[in-house]
Structure formats: structure tokens, C-alpha cells
Amino acid sequence: MIITEEKVLAALSHVEDPDLKKDLVTLKMIKDIKIEDKKVSFTLELTTPACPLKDMLKNACVNAVKHFVDAEAEININITSRVTKPVDTSQLKAIKNIVLISSGKGGVGKSTVASNLAVTLAADGAKVGLIDADIYGPSVPIMFDLVGAKPSAKETEDGKTLILPIEKYGIKLLSLGFFSDPDQPVPWRGPMASNAIKQLFNDADWGELDYLLIDLPPGTGDIHITICQSFPIAGAVIVTTPQQVALADTRKGLAMFGMPGINIPVLGVVENMSYFTPEELPENKYYIFGKDGGKELAERFEVPFLGEVPLVQGITEAGDKGAPISLQTDHPQAISFKEIAGKIAQQISIHNVQQMANC
């Protein structure tokens, strides 16, 4: 039996992306088909390097070619990615997806979640940036061991001065904490804080990024409205803890993104500090803050539940040392963050493709 490119494409048209609800050929995810006798090679171009379905799709492609073309075919698949972006990219065109890490509540671990998601996405091969938008309590300098660090600047050909984000662990970082005394408060009114945040976007040389994560402050105030109305946002991730006192505020934070004039898709809910577990006894779970609060919040608002992050001593120690736990790729909590990051990237791709289809 002679293997042809047409036969291979016809076979692969039977493989559907379960998230995007279309086959891989229609989605133009099959590239560079090469055939030499029984040897078939091609590139499978995914919508994100953090795709949680990559192994499933790869196996499905192999099975399709063997079933519909030749059972004796020798198949080699190269997996790459081209991260999708929202249709509206009138500003910051080199940044494909701006993702808000938010909550209506302080103290739920947004900075820990944002830092570990950034590390995980970068480790998967994505180009990642992180803005610490918590004007009054910036955490990124501590989380990345950069207290006292100062970004440099460069002058463009048209005479404009741009801030150069600090790079660490493969992530480009900016925080108002880099420009202020860590021991002094920042007594700014709303307009001053909003203008400062805009500068972190507009007056920085971010280069090309697949994902720019924004660690938002608590509440639903000036900073949130400024960012939501000034820049094209791919979606928001809601962080909460399980207890009712946190959920009461988080519900308001989540609902804000559906308000007229904001209307930003919620990519899902992350439940942080879901339970306490001793690292030496990982099977023991103590639900000291209650149970399933984040899952019930996601169900109530009909958004995805992205996963649980347990409370363990190692996460706290890693953050305080400036080396997020996700750098330890085999650590159980790093695995949790990897699964959550994959689901977030998955939801971004779904929303972007749906948006393009509706245009």
C-alpha cells in the first residue's frame, strides 16, 4: 500500500481536539508531512506548550494513521506549539495573552499561585511575564529573591525610555516593589496607583510573550478597573481558600468580571490551602479551613474548577527563600501547579478559538 500525504491528512481528519471540537486538519494543527516508504513524519502544532492533552492527541494521531492508512507505518510526530491570542490585540501586540490572577479577598495566596503558575508555564516552554500589581503590598521581590533589585532602562530610537523587566527563572518580572523602599508604605490615591500600573504595561520592553500574568491586589477597586478597561485581557483566574469568610469576598471578585464595561471571561477557580498535609505523611489530609468551598463557587458561577493546592510547609519556605516550589518539578505541589497551569492554558485556547470563530 502506497502512503500519500492525502491519505495521512484524511486519516488525521478523524482526530478531534476535545476542547476545540474540531479535527486537527481543520484546525491547521498538522504541519510538514514527510513520507518515505513506510516512514511518516509530521508536526503537531498545539495551541499552548502547556497543553494537558498532548500525549492523548499524539497517541490518537498514531492510531488514526495506522488504522486508516497502513498498520505497518512507522510514525514520528514532532510536537510544537503556537500560542493563540484574543482577537482584540490593538495594544501590546507582542503580548498574546494577559491573564489576571485575582480574588476579592486578601491573604488567599494569589502571589504564591501567580508565581508558581509563571514558573510552570515557563518550564513548559512558554514565554512568560509577571506583573506584581499589588501596589500597597508587593510580593514578587520576596517570592523571587529580588528584594532591593532595580530594573535597568533603555532608550528607543524615537527617544522614549523603556523599563527593562528583571528576568529570573525564565520569567520577565516587574513590580512596584522594585521602585520603592520595602520598609515604607505607599500612600497613593487611586489615580496615582492606576497611572503607575499603566506604566508597568506601556513603558516596559516586554518583548514577545505568550502569557503575561497579573498578580492583582485584593478587592475590586481602581487597579482592577484600570487594567480591565485599558488592556485586552484573555481571562481571569480566581483564587480562594475554602472557608466561607474568604468565599464571601471571592464571590464579589468573581462577579466583577461579568459586570457591564468589564465583561472578561473567568478561566476558572483555584482553591488554595485546600487542606493541610504533613510532607512526611502526604496521605494525611486535614481540612482546617473547610472543604470544597472553591469547587462549590465554580459550580455556582458555572466556570471550571481548576484544582486544589494543599497547605504544606515547603510552599511557604520556598516562597520566603525566593525559589517557588514549582522549580522542584517532582514535588507533589509542583505537580498540582503544573496540572492547574495546563488547565488555564487550555481554557485560554478554547476562549480564543471561540472568539475567532465568532468574528
Image: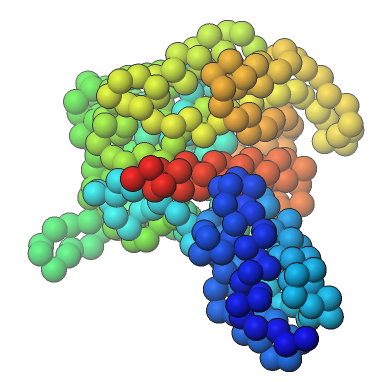
- The residue sitting at 26% across, 31% down in the picture is 229
Q: Is residue 217 above or below residue 210?
A: above
- Residue toward you, 39 or 49: 39
- Whether residue 55 appears in this view of the structure is no
- Residue toward you, 146 or 281: 281
For the N terminus, which image quadrant? bottom right
Pick out the residue farthest to the bottom: 37
Q: Residue 234 location in percent, x, y?
A: 41, 41
Q: Is residue 38 above or below residue 205?
A: below
Pick out the residue farthest to the left: 158
- The residue sitting at 28% across, 40% down in the picture is 231
- The residue sitting at 24% across, 49% down in the picture is 90
Q: Is residue 267 above or below residue 147?
A: above
Q: Is residue 219 above or below residue 127?
A: above
Q: Does 69 sit left or right of 352 as displayed?
A: right
For the C terminus, which image quadrant? top left
Numbered-mark total: 0
Locate residue 125: give its quadrant.
Answer: bottom right
Q: Does 217 sit left or right of 78 as displayed?
A: left
- Whether residue 302 appears in this view of the structure is yes
Pick out the residue farthest to the front: 1
- The residue sitting at 56% across, 47% down in the picture is 20
Locate residue 305: give its quadrant.
Answer: top right
- Residue toward you, 155 or 263: 263
Locate residue 333: give its quadrant.
Answer: top right
Q: Residue 23 location in percent, x, y?
A: 59, 57
- Residue toward you, 353 or 189: 353
- Colour treatment of the image: rainbow
Q: Residue 270 location in percent, x, y?
A: 60, 30
Q: Residue 264 location in percent, x, y?
A: 39, 31
Q: Does 27 sit left or right of 222 as displayed?
A: right
